[in-house]
Amino acid sequence: MKLTSDDLLRFGIADEVIPEPLGGAHRDPAGVVASVLTAVDAALTALSTIAPDELRDRRYRKFRRIGSAAP
């Protein structure tokens, strides 16, 4: 059995999957870096609007769910 990035997303372990170019990231390293930076910037922007206590609570709940039967 293979565990994929889509599985990690579905299980709530990953927050987002950044698509690779056809053939793999090594085919367009600059494009992949740009995609990753864009995703990180968007995530940090979204997270910056949430109070620190709420972020801690969300993180706690997320990691407590990992490995449980229900996502």
Image (cartoon, rainbow, N blue to C red):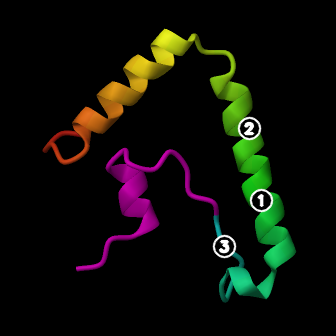
Q: Quadrant of the N terminus?
A: bottom left
The tag earlier along the polypeptide, 3 or 1, is 3
Q: Gap between marks 3 and 1, in whole Å? A: 9 Å
Amino acid at dot 1: Ser
The tag earlier along the polypeptide, 2 or 3, is 3
Q: Which mark is residue 35?
A: 1
Q: In this picture, which residue range is highlighted in magenta?
A: 1-18
Q: Gap between marks 1 and 2, in whole Å? A: 11 Å
The residue carrying pointer 3 sits among few (fewer than 14), some (14 to 19) or many (20 or more) residues within 10 Å by Cα, namely some
Q: Quadrant of residue 69?
A: top left
Q: Quadrant of the C terminus?
A: top left
Residue 10 image offset from top left, x and y in percent: 37, 51
- At x 37% / y 44%, what residue is drawn? 12
Residue 64 drawn in magenta: no
53, 21: nearer the viewer: 53
Residue 4 drawn in magenta: yes
- At x 47% / y 13%, what residue is drawn? 54
Amino acid at dot 3: Glu
Judged left or right of residue 66, residue 24 is right
67 over 70 or under it: above or below: below
Instruction: Say what secondary structure mark 1 lies in.
Output: helix
Amino acid at dot 2: Ala
Instruction: Say what secondary structure mark 2 lies in.
Output: helix
Judged left or right of residue 38, residue 51 is left
Q: Which mark is residue 42?
A: 2
Q: Which mark is residue 20?
A: 3
The tag earlier along the polypeptide, 1 or 2, is 1
Q: Quadrant of residue 50?
A: top right
Instruction: Say what secondary structure mark 3 lies in.
Output: loop
